[in-house]
Amino acid sequence: MAIQAGLYKMAIHQDVVIAIMNAGIDSVRFHEVKEVRGDVLKKLALPAPNYYLVEPLGIVEFEPSPEDFKILDCVCKLEGKNWGKLTHPLAIRRKTYDEADFFRVNHFYHWIMASKQVIDILVINGWTSDFSIGDQAMPGIKVTEFGPDWYEKAEARVKLLHPNYKVFV
């Protein structure tokens, strides 16, 4: 199951970057955030730790194709041009997926996707207290609880809600 890890830009703490790099995940580049400003500083210990923007290196195509969509005021409100509202999650074209642990959907550069291996790094380190993944577009549910069997529970919920859905086509 592919997991939508974030929308738009995703900034992560330096400890997460180190854990990802130590796990040998190389389908991503990290770009240091030079300065943290604004209200977020109220929530951070000072001096603020280093944060990095995530640049996924993998790119996939999905079904239906982007030509079948119109983007409303927010990409989170995708609506099909020809087939009405989104009634099932999007599927990844397997031939475009190179097994990258971080990837984005072509034509939707702000969708940052991650594999189970990446999410497991967050779960193992307890970095999921204010974290959620997924939505109706992929994998068809939002995941907010991350115990040791988070993946199996999420997969079962997707199958219950979308019994005929396949992540890859």
Image (cartoon, helix red, strand yellow):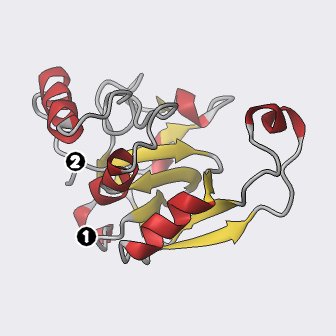
For this orientation, the residue located farthest to the front is 46
| Residue type beneath disc 2 | Val
Nearer the observer: mark 1 or 2; the answer is: 2
Residue 151 percent across, percent down from the top left: 21, 40
Q: Residue at x 74, y 33 (%)?
A: 43
Which mark, by number, is residue 167?
A: 2
Task: Tell me the quarter of the picture where residue 96 sits.
Answer: bottom left
**Vertical side of 22 occupied by 103: above or below:** above
User: Is 12 displayed left or right of 43 in the figure?
Assistant: left
Q: Quadrant of residue 31?
A: bottom right
Residue at (25% x, 34% y) in the render? 147
Look at the numbered disc 2 and give the secondary structure of its residue.
loop
Of the two numbered discs 1 and 2 on the same chain, state the one appearing first in sequence. 1
Side (left or right) of 35 relative to 52? right
Of residues 167 and 55, the one nearer the viewer is 55
Q: Foreground: 1 or 18?
A: 18
Q: Amino acid at mark 1?
A: Lys
For image coordinates 35% across by 30% down, the residue present is 143
**What mark, if any, has residue 95 been given in the picture?**
1
Residue 100 spot, x, y in % from top left = 35, 70
Quick check: 119 above or below 33? above
Question: Residue 96 versus residue 31: which sits nearer the camera?
Answer: 31
Mark yes or no: residue 123 visible. yes
